[in-house]
Image (spheres, coloured by chain):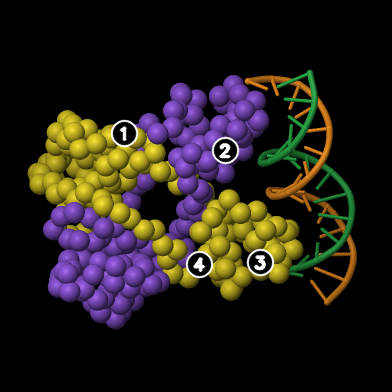
Chain colours: A purple, B yellow, C green, D orange
Amino acid sequence: MIELDDIDRGLIRALARDAAQSASALGRRFDLSQPATWRRIRRLEQAGVIRGRQLRLDAEKLGFGVTVFLGVKLALKGRVSLEDFERAVVAIPEVQSVEHILGLYDYRLRVVARDVADFERVLRRRIMTLPGAGEVEANVLLSEERLPGPL
Amino acid sequence: MIELDDIDRGLIRALARDAAQSASALGRRFDLSQPATWRRIRRLEQAGVIRGRQLRLDAEKLGFGVTVFLGVKLALKGRVSLEDFERAVVAIPEVQSVEHILGLYDYRLRVVARDVADFERVLRRRIMTLPGAGEVEANVLLSEERLPGPL
DNA sequence: TCTGAAACTAAAAATGG
DNA sequence: CCATTTTTAGTTTCAGA
């Protein structure tokens, strides 16, 4: 595991808030030159700590007003492999993330839809027909807050 | 809601894969000049469709080997407000996201910890002591895949 | 209104001390 | 690690479709 000093942690924290900040702007905040800051960031990228930059999209502004979390329990475990399920689920356009978890449900899916009627279509035609899908629980997202996390 | 054409959707899709791409590189892929590409991206930012850029961090490389999803049911609803709970939960460093949902549990939390022993500490000293927290269910994350989503 | 060309500003990458 | 230079990307202006 890579060694991080306080400045590295500060840079990660600052970039986690806004990944579009320039190395020179960050350097000013941490009393570092622009190349020094840039090299630290590149080192974090090469070490794999920073895996890339992700767009934060507003699903509502894109016309997807409904976000639902689905807990999916697999029936016929063994007869249908996890790989078959995963291959099929990642091909559904409305699925934003697939989490394989340990607990009452085997997978947790984040699904977006234009509205509740559209969600019903996704559920009936896409989710319920997944190979091996058994019990499904749905939770509608009311609001969400993303936090910086530890460090 | 903003009008999007096929090029806008293509740009969003390409940036969702990697938000660090330059406007000129994107322009080459969509047969657009660099300024035209840049203006489309700025328009999406100003319309709020693109809310910003986020760092994708590798939690394991940062020493957080355990990710757990917690379903939290509030006890004493009404006596302790949702706001009190939310204020307290967003102050826990190990909490990465707080989702207010409709269903069996009231909130879903994404929590990271260095290992299982560290997670027990977070659970006992941070989560169980939250104002209004009732039943708690935990699901350990085994693996995760993030997908581009619709459009 | 959106485009591309050109000119300009700022940032990133490379280099040498 | 810092200072400097070169290269590349971001930004503004403007004229034309």
Q: Quadrant of residue B59?
A: top left
Give whichever of discs 4 and 3 has the lower sequence position: 4
User: What's the residue type where badge 3 is placed?
Assistant: Arg
Give the CA distance from mark 1 to mark 4. Answer: 36 Å
Residue B40 lies, with reference to residue A53, above or below; the image says below
Query: Label 2's element?
Result: helix
- Residue A11, given in percent of the width and then of the height, sits at 50, 32
Give the CA distance from mark 3 to mark 1. Answer: 41 Å
> Tags 1 and 2 in contact by the CB under 8 Å rule?
no
- In this rendering, which labeled residue sits more in front, label 4 or label 2? 2
User: What's the residue type where badge 4 is placed?
Assistant: Met
- In this rendering, which labeled residue sits more in front, label 3 or label 1? 3
Give the CA distance from mark 2 to mark 3. Answer: 26 Å
Q: Read off the chain for label 1.
A: B
Give the CA distance from mark 4 to mark 2. Answer: 38 Å
For image coordinates 56% across by 62% down, the residue present is: B14
> Tags 4 and 2 in contact by the CB under 8 Å rule?
no
Judging by the rendered image, the residue that carries numbered circle 3 is: B29
Residue A37 seen? yes
Judging by the rendered image, the residue that carries numbered circle 1 is: B93
Q: Residues within 10 Å of mark 2 (few under 14, many from 20)?
A: few
For image coordinates 33% across by 42% down, the residue present is: B96
Query: Label 1's element?
Result: loop
Q: Nearer the viewer, residue A87 or B2?
A: A87
Indicate left or right for A50 with A68 as reference: right
Q: Residues within 10 Å of mark 3 (few under 14, many from 20)?
A: few
Indicate left or right for B123 with A19 as reference: left
- Residue B48, given in percent of the width and then of the height, sits at 52, 56
Give the CA distance from mark 4 to mark 3. Answer: 26 Å
The label number, if any, that marks residue A42 in the structure image: 2
